[in-house]
Amino acid sequence: MRAIWQIFRLLWAADPHAMWRGAALSVVVLIMGAALLGLSGWFITATGLAGVAGIGIAFDVFRPSAGVRFLALGRAGARYGERVLTHDATLRALAALRITLMRRLEIWPIEALRQLRGGAALTRITADVDALDGVALRLALPVAAALVTHVVAFAMLFWLVTPAVAVAIALGYLLGGSLILLRVALRTFAPSTEAEAAMQALRRRAIDLFRGQREAILQGLLPTWRARIEAEDSRTRAAQDRLDRIDTGAGLVLSAVVALVTALVLGLSGGLIAAGRIDPAQAAIGVFVALALAETILPLRRGLAEIGRMRDAAERVLAPPPAGARPLPAVGPAPQSDRAAGLEVCDLSLTRPGRDVALLSGVSFAVAPGQMLAISGASGTGKSTLLDALAGIAPLRAGSARLLGVPLGEWPEPALRQHLTLLPQRTALLGGTILENLEIARPGLTEDEAQEVLRAVALDGVIAERGGLEARLDEGGAGLSGGESRRLALARALLRRPDILLLDEPTEGLDAETARRVVAGIRAYLPTAAIVAATHREAEKDIADMHLDLKDFVQNQQ
Amino acid sequence: MSAKKTPSSRLITERPRQLLRAASIWSAFSGVLWPVQAALIAWVIQGWAAGGIGAAGWAAAAGFALLGLLRATADRVAGRRAFAAADLVVAAERKVLLDRESLRSDRAVSSADLAALLSEKLALLMPYVSRYRPAMARVMVLPLLYLALTASLSWAAALVLLLAGPLIPVFMALVGMAAKEASARQMVEIGDMNTLLIDRIAALPDIRILDATEKSRADFAALAEGVRRRTMVVLRVAFLSSTLLELFSAIGVAMVAVYVGFSLLGEITFGTYGAPLTLGEGVFILLLAPEFFQPLRDLAAAWHDKAAAEAVAEELEARASRVAAQVLGAGARVDRLGGPATLEMTGVRVRRGGLVRAMPDLSVAAGESVALRGPSGTGKSTLLDLAAGLLRPEAGQITVAGRPLDDDSADGWRARLAFVPQSVHVPDVTLRDFLDPHGQGADLAAALDKARAGSIVAALPEGLDTRLGETGAGVSGGEARRLLLARAFLTGADVILADEPTADLDTGTAGEIIAALVALAEAGRTVIVATHDMRLAAAMGRVIELEGAA
């Protein structure tokens, strides 16, 4: 529950002003609704009494009827204002919630972030933030508004009718309502967790089936895989059925509370009238208000039925970052570095992420500024792991690496990123224009600079054909071919103008001629950088100054 | 506009329809009880004005409470029936979708999109069935009933309701159109916040390396602010529609109250049938007025459930209407097809990407090793898919093990096959289960050695018990192909189909794969590879050159 509270405070803080006004208006809506029915009931009964008594002429009809009209119009107006204000505040809150989530994810180990890219994990995050969207709008605000409304209604009934009726209504609704809603909230925890888990499992299994469909058919496993999906489907349905049973059950009991409270007021008022404590018109106020207050508690059940889902989502969103390698300190002063020192690696040994067997050992090389080293090796020998280690993403097992004269472990991450850039094997672009994609690497980039770097990676022609720097890419950079996206990511890396540039298969997917132009372009663009490129292609090997084959350092050869 | 015609209502089959009918009847029954409760209140208040009714008041209150309980119960029964209907609709659609998509031979959309449709998106049909449909049923019955009851006492009060009620849908439609237009104007080129968020999170490793986390967050905040501004423009108009509904119902209730009040005072003398309204009749009319509008408000609240369901239903229909080429057979595990391991194709034509193209004729004898060579685009992969029954030919004859390859023989034929695709899908299972999917418990180590894949297993942290796939340890493309060849040794498959098994690999790994394929061929198995790798082609017994087919 603490997690939900934390999320609520976050949502509220996004725009407290609008939230307060929205909350105030939602109270106004409820109070005006109850007042409208109460006043109408009083008005009719009072006029009825006056008519019977034959004193209709003396009855002041104009103030009450004006009151009825005012409440009717005012309620509609307040409702509109409430909806606009709370939605506006909620949209701000949604952005704030998502930014908080991004902040939290930013400190994850990069290895863990890479695993997030699978479809299932990202949809899970979306589902979670969606569930949390309702914390203010469907849970906190309606509950608070209902409570305030009941306090006001209690005071008004106390004053206009009689304490007994006020107490009956307040006790009936607050006690009955909160007991039932509390019970709903508690009982839905387990099934909502279960329903959500089953739904996620269903989705995962479905992705497995559709992705591995050919494999399943070839192995004759399709019926088995289908059966697994059907099992998750049944689990989802059973959990949802349980939730619906709790939900409709709560609806039943809440409606019963409304009926009982109204009946209680109806019966009680008869006695009070007989005792001369109130007149029938006052009694009518009590009855009509008792009915109207149903609107304060009936809608709450939906928000409270979601509380289990909200809690789980809040806990996942606020969970501490997963364990994983963070070889570099996150903050710290920039060390004294020497640009002329380049990159020196001495007797390095590495393991694959999450495995403890040595993958490579005894790797040593030095790359001076302006030099390029090509690293080759069969797939799986650890080219990418080596580059990750040098970029401070994966841990070193033994040995040392000095970047610009400073041992790798003494570089705080932000300082290292100023001097070193890695082009990983898998890169991601963003939805937006080409220029925006480049600006991420260098804020305030000019168009000339952008064109220059695009020329360096032989992409200027392609981009011009597609409408220039303002051409838009879809989410994930969709709209460019594989080779084009690769070169745009490369251009982005070059814009950092690093002293050390690590490239993992930079020309993958390019034909030999273009690959050569690209590698030459990189060297011309960064004439003083120390460049290390992992590759199995000839273009890099030919243009590089040195060449290292990792097969000499591979461990556990059998 | 007939409700029967919409895609979403077509999804409701016989059994859910019956359940919904029951739900609607229970729901309407609950609505019918309200006038009785209202009459009790009216009777009590009338009694109070007439000088008190004593203990009868408590009896009436008890009656009111009992009726209230009965209504609550009826609502619950209605709700449960409607839920059951919704549950059946979703379950049925899920099954239909799975039946069709799991045997589809072409996959036009991404697996993740399809899985989203199957899980969360289909679930969007539930509120439509369980809330919108019963609300629709109530709108058809209850307002008319309350109107008739009101009219039986006062035609003037009924006229107020009659004027306010039907105007609501008209105004709502007008506002709805305005909202649609506003949203069309505003929503160009903007995604919703979640799409933006996913985009940024997926790129987070890159953003970290580029030291651009703050810039990325600031960009996101600016984009989200744009989304908010544009959304609010749309919402301001859209909320007008629900406000109008509230307004009309509030004005309706207020006018009824004022009319009744003035009538009771004797200041208004029209609107009834002779005798003036009594206090009890007035209270009764007043209590019916808000309930007259309630079904409409319920329907409006469920409106976007319907819009969401409509979108899902349209997607389902679009998907169903596309011709789905199905694979041969059921993908089930059956006994191996008997006969020699041969493959023949004559006059085969196949539809790919809307075009029908002719495939070259082919005849491969048992134990033969064949390389299909040709530039890309000549249909090498298509040929292998046809041979495995993963594609259904439009015309021509495919003969395997001496009998036609069709729905009856495909599963049995595939039981003899090992297929090494260009990009291997590694499912989320342990390596042991991957190699030995049917749990035959054969000698894994020997098979791995024969396929020269032993070193891959040795490098995995938990050896054969390592989980593979998306959430587990990754294996590279070359490693996965070697593991599949190991599986071919293991399962005793006597026909090996491999699609570009050495593409994108360095010479060392490619050599390992060629050696494994040669070992399989030497063991007397039929090996067919599609390749443009000269070394691999040379290692096979026969090379078939494919021409650029027309």
Image (spheres, coloured by chain):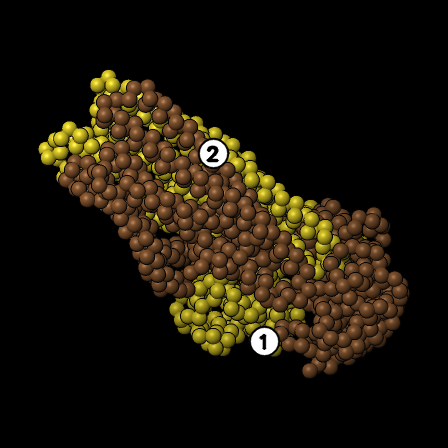
| Residue pictured at 60% horizontal, 58% vertical | B111
Q: Is residue A242 left or right of residue B167?
A: right
Q: Chain of mark 1?
A: A
**Which numbered marker is on residue A74?**
none
Q: Where does the image place residue B33, in percent across and percent down from the top left?
A: 40, 36
Q: Is residue A159 left or right of residue B64?
A: left
B533, above or below B186, in the image: below
Q: Chain of mark 2?
A: B
Residue A233 seen: yes
The C terminus of chain A - image quarter = bottom right
Q: Where does the image place residue B429, in percent across and percent down from the top left?
A: 70, 49
| Residue pictured at 16% horizontal, 32% vertical | A51
Residue named by callout 1? A514
The front one of B335 and B222 is B335
Q: Which chain is brown?
A: B
| Residue pictured at 38% horizontal, 63% vertical | B184
| Residue pictured at 75% horizontal, 49% vertical | B433
**Which numbered marker is on residue B73?**
2
Between disc 2 and disc 1, the foreground one is: 2
CB within 8 Å, label 2 to label 1: no
The disc labelled 1 sits on which kind of residue? Thr
Q: Residue furthest front?
A: B274
Q: Which chain is yellow?
A: A
Q: CA distance from mark 2 to mark 1?
A: 74 Å
SS for callout 2? helix
The front one of B542 and B109 is B109
Residue A33 seen: no
SS for callout 1? helix
Q: Where does the image place residue A295, in percent across and percent down from the top left?
A: 35, 37
Mark 1, Cα crowd under 10 Å, few <14 / some 14-19 / many 20+, is: some
The disc labelled 2 sits on which kind of residue? Thr
